[in-house]
Image: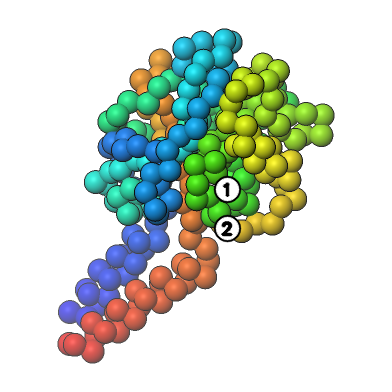
């Protein structure tokens, strides 16, 4: 009896420590509004961007900011609370209100960006820069301007052209990604400040990136990324310890 319970409990501990990739490959998502950092939806800023879902070259008016998504599937770390914020990495499609997304890896996103923006700055480097951006500033996001700035920075890293020093900057001339003169001025200033100090700013968090994509070559909805706190080794050991503490609790009851 004891050994059977030990093996069953150990399996539960192992499942809790498994990576999201080991879980189901899809997740049903519903769009619920603008990003919510814990005090209610912060709303969207506006501006003219190119490319956009209407045109690959001509600027069009779009909302700028993170999205709040919900799901009844709480199996993934990022969806465990049922609600989470997501950020567009697909400037060519609008978002569908409800969709079954494929849960991809950073490598999947890197492959997509390499295809869309071939050149010396690979998709892998762009993804690494996105994760670094999150590690530096994500924990401080709380306002409408923060949300718009983070979304602009994500777009710039994903699609923009880095300068000679390798630094990304949002401007009105970059053919890879550019903004109109009436675009969320305060958000641009904040985003460019983050991008200027990317690689040198203090790391304030440890985030992992999940890539939610529609898995459709023609594109049915907007692909997004989700940033969630990564489980560190001490956290994993603590989780394992809790699991074995539970085992001994079961043993004492026998």
Element type at marker 1?
Answer: helix
Tell me if I can see residue 3 in this picture.
Answer: yes
Between residue 77 and residue 55, name the one nearer to us: 55
Q: Horizontal and vertical percent for residue 182?
A: 60, 23
Q: Do the residues labelled 2 and 1 touch (CB within 8 Å)?
A: yes
Q: In which quarter of the image is residue 128?
A: top right
Against 204, residue 218 (above or below) is above
Identify the residue under disc 2. 205
**Residue 130 in the image: x percent, y percent?**
59, 41
**Rendered residue at 33%/48% (across/down):** 83
Q: Is mark 2 on a helix, strand or loop?
A: loop
Residue at (50, 56) in percent of width and height: 230
Classify 10 Å Cα crowding around label 1: few (below 14), some (14-19), many (20 and above): many
Point out the tag, 2 or 1, that comes first from the N-terminus: 1
Q: Name the residue under label 1.
A: 134
**Image quarter for residue 99?**
top left
């Amino acid at each position: 009896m004891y050994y059977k319970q030990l093996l069953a409990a150990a399996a539960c501990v192992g499942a809790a420590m498994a990576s999201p990739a080991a879980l189901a490959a899809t997740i049903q998502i519903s769009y619920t509004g603008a990003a919510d950092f814990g005090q209610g939806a912060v709303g969207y800023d506006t501006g003219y961007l190119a490319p956009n879902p209407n045109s690959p070259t001509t600027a069009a008016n779009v909302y700028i900011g993170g999205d709040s998504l919900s799901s009844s599937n709480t199996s993934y770390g990022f969806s465990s609370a049922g609600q989470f914020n997501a950020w567009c990495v697909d400037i060519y499609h609008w978002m569908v209100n409800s969709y079954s997304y494929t849960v991809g890896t950073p490598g999947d996103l890197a492959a997509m960006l390499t295809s869309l923006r071939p050149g010396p700055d690979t998709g892998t480097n762009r993804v690494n820069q996105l994760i670094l951006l999150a590690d530096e500033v994500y924990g401080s996001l709380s306002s409408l301007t923060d949300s718009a700035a983070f979304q602009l920075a994500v777009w710039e890293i994903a699609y923009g052209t880095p300068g000679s020093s390798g630094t990304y900057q949002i401007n009105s001339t970059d053919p890879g990604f550019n903004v109109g003169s009436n675009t969320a001025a305060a958000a641009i200033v904040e985003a460019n400040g983050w991008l200027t100090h990317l690689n040198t700013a203090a790391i304030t968090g440890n985030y992992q990136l999940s890539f939610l994509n529609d898995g459709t070559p023609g594109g049915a909805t907007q692909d997004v990324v989700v940033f969630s706190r990564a489980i560190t080794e001490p956290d994993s050991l603590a989780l394992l310890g809790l699991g074995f503490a539970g085992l001994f609790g079961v043993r004492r009851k026998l």
